[in-house]
Every structure is written in structure tokens, then in C-alpha cells.
Amino acid sequence: MEKPKMALYWCASCGGCEEAVVDLAEKILDVINLVDIVFWPVAVDFKIDDVEKLPDGSIVASLINGGVRLSEHEHVVKLLRRKSKIVVAYGACSSWGGIPGLANLYDKEEILKYVYGDAPSVDNPGGVRPREKHVEEVELELPSFLPRLLPLDVVIDVDYYIPGCPPTPEVTWKALEILLSGNLPPKGSVLGASDRALCYECPLNNTKPDKILLKDIKRPHQVIVDPEKCLLTQELICLGPVTRGGCGALCIKAAMPCTGCFGSLDEVIDYGGKAVSYFASILDYYTEEDVERILDRLPDPMGVFYRYTLPASRLRGKIKTTMR
Amino acid sequence: MKYPPNFLVIKVMCSGRVDPQFILEAFRRGADGVMVAGCHPGDCHYIEGNYKTLRRMTLLKRMLREFGIEEERFRLEWISASEAEKFVRVANEMYEKIKALGPLRIEEV
Ligand code: SF4
Ligand code: SF4
Ligand code: FES
């Protein structure tokens, strides 16, 4: 019998999600035994042409990581959507934009100006910028840079999500088992992770008091962490209470607070908004001046509370207005 | 005395019920401004609901700035149930300021 076909693709991502698949270690051999990989630019030499030749709907599942930032991403994900029965957003960037999505706080021109000019490490006296067309003997084309980064489900219909930055091998494996079992959960489900907040699976949860009020906000480099005590009680911003579990509290076990890479729980419509709701409410201050003063200890709230989810937030980033 | 007719009032049990997500959703759905009003500090029926509101909204304000939403479009006020006059005054004041700014038309994607 022919093996089911699977495709993997990367958009705007760091490569960590590709690494995460390879991190399945010897289990990757089981995957290869079970499926036929028909497209995986990072590892297998198939071209976009090869995908185009496949009949529509002939790929059982496409796992796509990274947010959509280039016209090429948009083109390939639309193609994969057409060719696949199931499309899975793999990892934080594909699901909600991820860290590259923080660039949505700036417009296209600001980003290009910085990256090709103002960044301290750039030496570009001619002010060269990438061009979409270049003619010199032959005509060359580069994909265009879209106005903002979009989560996959804004561009195409997405069936399932696998969270994490990157998803752990355990989560990836569990998700693959579900996908290959044929026993599929309802569309839109998050695969391989938990339905409860990270705190429930955190080994430090039993040291967390019922009520916490914080006098200070600290960053990890400012404290010597007691690895036996809930990090929140040590005045570190741990987002465990509002983050989906499933990672096994990896960061906490390494004495680092959770930064939220498994995203929000069901019912939450804006991860950052929810995180603000939770975190601000436990600051032990009662007047506007005092609250402002303690918040000065938090220089980058967008980067803290929307680290992985800005493009999936209600406003998607710095707003563009049609009239001003 | 009247508050502006396009000032939509949504009643909740306590200002502490107002999740910052609601405010972001309101802007997304086309609100030109959002005002959160609660009982004066010390007067919350649920004891500390409005202190939580104060902390949440103070942080949210800083973030709205980074989202590109002008300061005048968001306001936190303490108005007790007996202060109808203050409510009307504040609502009208906010209305005037937003009118001067014009509507907030957020481009989809
Ligand atoms: S707040 Fe963080 S450290 Fe504390 S129990 Fe939750 S996940 Fe663990
Ligand atoms: S502890 Fe938080 S940031 Fe770390 S892997 Fe788990 S979900 Fe991601
Ligand atoms: S009852 Fe809590 S603010 Fe009014």
C-alpha cells in the first residue's frame, strides 16, 4: 500500500522548528517508515514544481512552521493548502507570529531602514536595498516583503496547531500519532499539548501560595534563583498561569520563568491582554504614582507579554489607520 | 444633562471584571475610544477590584501607546454611583477629544 504523503515547509522562522523535527532522534525513522515525505526544503531535494504536479488533496498533512512575511511564503502555503487534506501550523511563529512577529510594531519602511542602514553592525554606504527585480544578462526576481507578518491562519485555512518555540519532541510525536491515527479531533484543536495552564504541571506549583502580591519586578539576570521555589514568588515574571501546558515546564526546570511559548489556553482571545490582566493584578501598589513607578521596572511590556503572539493579537501590531 | 448618544454603556458588576482583552477587542471592532469607570479607590464592593483595575489599566495604557492608539482614546475614571454629573462631564469631555482626533479606522491585516 502506498504510504500517506506528508510535506514540511518553513516560512519566517529561525530554523528551530526544523531542528525540533530532527530532534525526534531515532523516532524520525518511524516517521519515515510511516509516511512519504514529498516536500521538505531544509532536508529533502524536492522543488515547488514537484508539489505543483501532485493532485489536489493528495498530501495527507502539511506541517508549516514560521509566520507569513514574504510573497513566496504566501504562494507556497496557498499551494500546500490546495494539495493537502490537513494543514497544521507547527510552532509558535506559524500559530501566532512568534518572535519575528514583534516586528509588527514597526512598518515595512522602518524595518528596511534599520536592517539595511541604521543597525550598528551594518556597513552599507551605498544604501543598497533588496530589489524585487534585477536585470543583468538575465532577469532575477526576489520575493517581496509583505507589509506585516501574519499568522498562517490569516492567510490560509488551518486545521490544527502544534504549539511551542519550538514544539518539544514529545509534543511533536504525540501530535504526529494523533494525525496518523486517523482519529482526528475537532478542527482548530491544539495537538500534543495540555488543556490546562502550565502551573498544573510545574514541579514548583506546590510552593506557590494561594495569594501572591509583588513588591518588585525582577529580570532573571538580577536574581539568584532559588530553583525550589515558584519563580513568581521570587518576583520574576512567570507566565505559567496563563500559558498552555504541555512542555513539561522545561524553562522552570532550568530556573528560568515561562515566557509563554505554548500560547494561550482555549477561550482566550488575546494572550497579551490576558497576561496583563493576570500579572498587573498582583502588583502590591494602590495609587497611580506607585503603579507607574513599579511599571518603570518593566521596560518592554510588549516584548514580555506578546513575545510569541503579537500578530495574532486583536490589533496584530502597531495599527495602520486608513485616516489620520 | 446628557451623555453623548454614541457613548455605549456596558455595565459589569465591578470594574475588576473588565479584562484588558475586552478593551483591545472593542478597538478591533471599531470603538473610537474606551472609558473604564469604577468606584473610587477604597469604595469597591468587592474590596479590591478597582485596585486591580488601576494596575491593569495603567499597564495597558503603556501598551496601547505602542499599538499606536492615541492616549485620548482610552481613559480610566473613578465615578461613584451617585456622581451622575461627573459621569456626564467626563463622557462629554472624552467625546470632544475623540471628535477632534477623528474616527479610528484600523486597517484589516
Ligand atoms: S508561576 Fe511559574 S514557577 Fe510558579 S508554579 Fe506557575 S509555572 Fe511554576
Ligand atoms: S516553560 Fe513556557 S516558555 Fe518554556 S518551553 Fe514551556 S511554555 Fe515555552
Ligand atoms: S464594585 Fe468594584 S469598582 Fe465598583
Image (cartoon, rainbow, N blue to C red):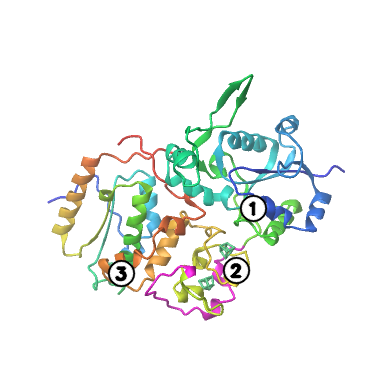
Range of magenta residues:
A194-221
Residue beneath label 1, please?
Answer: A16
Tell me, yes or no, whether the highlighted magenta stretch contains residue A3.
no
Using residue A116 as the reference point, say whether residue A44 is left or right of it: right
Give x and y (percent) for residue A212.
42, 76
Tell me if mark 2 has few (under 14), some (14-19) or many (20+) residues whose alpha carbon lies within 10 angstroms of its own: many
Residue at image coords 57%, 24%: A134
The answer to which of B89 and A280 lies nearer the viewer is A280
Whole-percent x, y for residue B85 in the image: 13, 58
Measured along the vertical axis of the image, is residue A40 above or below residue B35?
above
Type of residue at label 1?
A: Gly
Q: Say left or right for A41 vs B62.
A: right
Chain of the residue displaying label 3:
B
- Amino acid at circle 2: Ala
Q: Position of residue A114 (x, y in %)?
A: 45, 42
User: Which residue is identified by label 3?
Assistant: B51
Q: Which mark is residue A249?
A: 2
SS of the residue at dot 3? helix
Could you tell me how far apart the alpha carbons at marks 1 and 3 are, in whole angstroms? 41 Å
Residue that lies at the very extreme toward the top in this rendered image:
A137
Q: Are marks 3 and 2 in contact (CB under 8 Å)?
A: no
Proximity of marks 2 and 1: CB atoms separated by less than 8 Å: no
